[in-house]
Amino acid sequence: MRYGSLIKMLPLLLDQPVATWDLPRDQPYREKQIRTWILQRFVSSYDEMTDLSLPLRTSLASRFRLRAAEPITIQGSEDTTRKFLWKLGDGSLIESVLIPATLSKTGTRSARLTICVSSQVGCAYGCRFCASGLDGWRRNLTAAEIIGQVLEAARIAGRRADNLVFMGMGEPLANLPNLLSALDLLISPANIGMGARHVTISTSGLAPQIEELAHHPFPFRLALSLHAASDEVRDQIMPVNKRYPMERLLAACDIFIAARKKLIFFEYILLAGINDSPEQARLLAQHAKRLHAKVNLIPYNKVEGLPYERPTEDAIHLFCRTLLAAGVRATVRREKGHDIDAACGQLRLQKMQEDKKI
Ligand code: SF4
């Protein structure tokens, strides 16, 4: 599906059925104008579309909600990681994170910007260390709400992000149809034109959907939120492992890799005394070698109310060295973002708690 025409694109973007959308006679020209305002200039109101007639702007404003997500709270500044708390049309709250490029080995800073977006309101998967699942699952995001996070962040930052990662609130593969519709529009050169190679989809381990994605034409990257290297440990912290145990999950990844010939990533949050033992490191190295996976180690960031702790720096480095010694590519990641930062979901929880007190 390619959204070459506004009549297909706008209803998706604005969450409106096609039947309610009547375009003026000079449709192709208007289409291009409106597309540019929304997708390239990231406007937040129809009044800013100054090359449209006032009657057309008024008509659009009366029928189509332009912004799928509006900012409630913004933490951080232009040079640092910025965290956004968005309010959706039904009042639901979700989060995104905008992450500037980190310094490279040569000390230069690339101008690249990464956005980490949510795919659901809350999460049903209940990983024990994660704030996003603490209040349960409410609903899937629509394609417009997924795209809206990218557009609103671009408006605030003054430019669109180069990389897109689905590691925010929710399990992206549990909302696959809407995620793929959003990606279609985000990737299409006629619309937003984000490079598919700069899109990473993460999953806590939904094996059937990983197999389904193996044959999808987009060349996106897959990140597996593993967080433990044996069933015994994974069962303790990730309930999804009971449904799709390690061997089932790794077999799905075998299929993905055979079909795509693409590198996958293991995300591994290090929790003191839980999954940071030398034995877990050795097992993790075996899995990584089987799948030629690169391992991103993420020292845990404390979540208020949860019993987990960050390992010591010595323990983190020992774990990493064990992987490297086994010939596995591994890095310790310090940036923030969901899984990147297990505290994702905290802004939303705080806001919900404040609202309950009022
Ligand atoms: S880590 Fe991801 S899948 Fe697990 S509860 Fe949090 S948001 Fe859901």
Image (cartoon, rainbow, N blue to C red):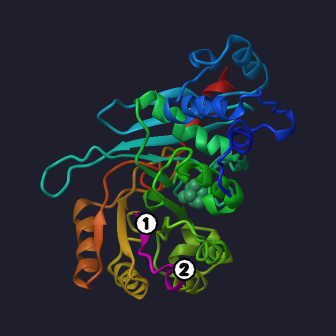
Residue 176 shows which numbered tag?
none
Q: Residue at x 52, y 40 (%)?
A: 150
Q: Label 1 sits on what residue type?
A: Glu
Q: Quadrant of the N terminus?
A: bottom right
* Magenta segment: 256-270
The residue beneath circle 2 is 256
Ligand 1 picture quarter: bottom right
Q: Position of residue 170 (x, y in %)?
A: 61, 53
* In the image, residue 116 above or below residue 308: above
* In the image, residue 280 above or below residue 271: below
Mark 1 vs mark 2, CA separation in Å: 17 Å
* In the image, residue 143 above or below residue 177: above
Which residue occupies the extreme right position in the image?
19
Residue 128 shows in the view? no
In which quarter of the view is residue 61 placed? Answer: top right
Q: Nearer the viewer, mark 1 or mark 2?
A: 2
Residue 112 shows in the view? yes
Q: Residue at x 34, y 84 (%)?
A: 282
Q: Nearer the viewer, residue 311 or 27?
A: 27
Q: Is residue 352 magenta?
A: no
* In the image, residue 11 above or below residue 198: above
